[in-house]
């Protein structure tokens, strides 16, 4: 895999300007939304949120999409809470559409920031993991990224930042992330969509809404990556076998 965008690197001054803007945006976002993204704060605004949605549903959907992209793109805390809340707010199908595409766009923005702006700081902080990622990518290709998205053993924000320093192409990163994050996104959005009101979710947490079918969904989410991994292990030797062998 090669990086096709190496000719579009910003100048040093451009990097500094973008870095300053990122830091300002992160600080402002944290100060503005740090507490606002807690379940307790959102639940206290439940009636107002429904009123806004009834008044202008398209605008509300667009603002929600932008907020989710900003939170994931700047690696701010609150993505899980937003996923549950948007499931409740928009319903399963619209919530799934919003979160799936907004999370992938945010992850891709973080990926690009790491590649072109934050390379040195990310490399100094995650240098050991970068070597591991590069070795695994050389061995397994995009399937390695797919398994990382399915099994969040590594936090997603770390994946976004470290993958930006690997040779993986943006287009590959986009579609693999979109596909790999979809099962988990679907389960969490569905969990939010089953909540009757945000006060219930705030008071009981996710554990309080685990009805049997939702519990089964979480179990399947945990088993699914293992099934995919075992399947790929069986398929890989067959794919690597020389065409003339055994004839």
Image (cartoon, helix red, strand yellow):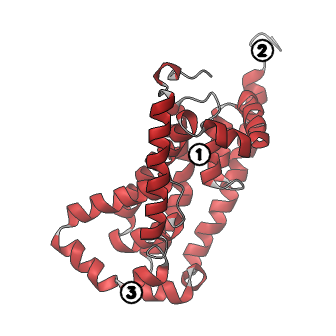
Disc 3 from disc 2: Cα separation: 63 Å
Residue underneath mark 2: 242
Secondary element at tag 1: helix
Q: Which label number is shown at residue 239? A: none
Secondary structure category for the residue under label 3:
helix
- Please rate how many residues cluster around mark 3, counting C-alpha atoms within 10 Å: few if below 14, some from 14 to 19, many from 20: few
Residue 237 locus on image (x, y percent)? 79, 28
Q: How many numbered dots are placed on residues in this image?
A: 3
Is residue 99 something that shows in the picture? no
- Relative side of 230 to 176, left or right: right
User: Is residue 93 at least partly visible in the picture?
Assistant: yes
Residue at position x 46%, y 23% from top?
A: 8
Mark 1 or 3, nearer chain start:
3
171 or 230, which lies in front? 171
Q: Residues within 10 Å of mark 1 (few under 14, many from 20)?
A: many
Task: Residue 18: name its quadrant.
Answer: top left
Say left or right for 118 vs 66: right
Q: Is residue 138 above or below residue 31?
A: above
* Closer to the eye: label 3 or 2: 3
Percent position of residue 72, x then y: 49, 55
Q: Quadrant of the N terminus?
A: top right
Rendering coords of residue 227 (x, y %): 70, 50
| Contact? badges 1 and 3 (CB < 8 Å) | no
Asked if disc 1 and disc 2 are in contact, CB closer than 8 Å, the reply is: no
Reading the image, the residue beneath label 3 is: 44
Single out the mark in the foreground, 1 or 2.
1
Are the residues at dot 3 and dot 2 in contact (C-beta closer than 8 Å)?
A: no
Residue 195 lies in quadrant: bottom left
Residue occupied by mark 1: 160
The residue positioned 66% from the left and 42% from the top of the image is 122
């Amino acid at each position: 895999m090669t990086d096709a965008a190496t000719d579009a690197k910003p100048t040093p001054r451009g990097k500094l300007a973008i870095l300053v803007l990122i830091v300002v945006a992160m600080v402002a976002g944290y100060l503005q939304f740090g507490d606002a993204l807690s379940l307790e704060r959102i639940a206290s605004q439940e009636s107002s949120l429904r009123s806004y949605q009834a008044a202008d549903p398209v605008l509300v959907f667009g603002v929600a999409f932008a907020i989710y992209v900003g939170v994931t793109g700047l690696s701010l805390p609150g993505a899980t809470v937003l996923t549950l809340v948007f499931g409740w707010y928009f319903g399963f199908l619209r919530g799934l559409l919003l979160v799936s595409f907004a999370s992938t766009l945010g992850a891709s923005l973080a990926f690009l920031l790491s590649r072109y702006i934050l390379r040195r700081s990310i490399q100094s902080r995650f240098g050991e993991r970068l070597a591991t990622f590069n070795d695994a990518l050389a061995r397994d290709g995009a399937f390695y990224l797919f398994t990382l998205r399915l099994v969040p053993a590594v936090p997603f924000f770390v994946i976004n930042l470290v993958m930006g320093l690997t040779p993986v192409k943006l287009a590959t990163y986009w579609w693999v992330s979109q596909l790999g994050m979809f099962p988990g996104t679907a389960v969490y959005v569905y969990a939010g969509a089953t909540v009757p009101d945000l006060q219930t979710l705030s008071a009981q947490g996710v554990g309080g809404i685990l009805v049997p079918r939702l519990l089964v969904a979480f179990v399947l989410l945990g088993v699914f990556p293992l099934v995919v991994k075992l399947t790929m292990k069986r398929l890989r030797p067959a794919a690597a076998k020389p065409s003339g062998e055994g004839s």
